[in-house]
Amino acid sequence: MAVHIDEEALRSSLQRLREAAFDADVVGVLKRTVDAVRDVFGYGGAGIMFITESGYLAYVAASDEVGRQLEEAQASVGQGPCYESYVYAREVVSGDVHADGRWPDLRARLSAEVRAVAGVPVLLGGSPVGTLNVYRGEPVEWDTSDVNALTAYGALIAEALAAALAAQQHSAVADQLQYALDYRVVIERAVGYLMGTHRLDAVTAFDALRKQARDSRRRVADVAAKVLGGTTGPDSDERVGDLRPSDLGRPA
């Protein structure tokens, strides 16, 4: 079954949210957005995730409990359409995650209520800082109208986030977002370095940075800087740049 988006409903919903976006705190805007995405188009649920200092996508807002569990499952295993949407900075969809062989560790953690999943990146300054995700309770064939609608909501989220940063809002979400913006470039460069040096795909290279950050109790940006030959922190005289073979997964 294909899903088709009502263009007029999309425009109307976006306009209402845009008019309210800058009159509310950023968390309120995010919650309104996921509720609108679910209600206007009849998805099972929607959610938003942002990158953390440790390099993990973390739950920020969800329209329902199943949506929250979907986000937390992907964050826990580091797999899924929303996770890959962040790493590759593009939309990633699955018509049925329970029958999808791309993310074997994810399926066991998902509710039976989650079947079709789609994720689009939330972009600021051309770089992803998080993802907007939706799910449906039955297998579907996502079409371009779904992707276009989600991309439009992702752009609206980015507008609200940019306004929150410009207003220097001091909140956990704003701080988390600022970190993502400040360090995305060095992380992207380190991922590219590992891909070229060790013949990895982007997801595996990003996972290697996360694992090294977790094992050494550092921020993923600090590990990325060291991979590139930079120096940060109290052990700045240490030459880091080669991750352990166990951190490096399958070749590209």
Image (cartoon, rainbow, N blue to C red):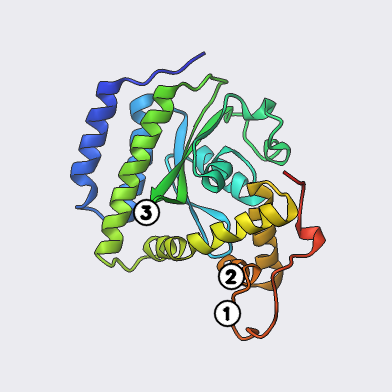
Q: Earlier in the sequence, mark 1 or mark 3?
A: 3
Question: What amino acid does circle 3 point to?
Answer: Gly
Mark identifier at residue 225: 2
Mark identifier at residue 125: 3
Residue 133, position in %: x, y?
48, 38
Picture residue at 59% right of the left edge, 75% below the top: 230
Q: Quadrant of the C terminus?
A: top right
Specify whether 136 is left or right of 178: right
Judge by depth and name the residue closer to the eye, 67 or 57. 57
Residue 90, position in %: x, y?
49, 39
Classify mark 3: helix, strand or loop.
loop
Specify whether 240 is left or right of 172: right
Q: Earlier in the sequence, mark 3 or mark 2?
A: 3
Picture residue at 29% right of the left edge, 51% below the top: 160
Residue 213 falls in which quadrant of the image? Answer: bottom right
Which residue corresponds to mark 1? 232
Question: What amino acid does circle 2 point to?
Answer: Ala
CA separation in Å, label 1 and label 2: 8 Å
Mark 1 and mark 2 in contact? Answer it, CB < 8 Å.
Answer: yes
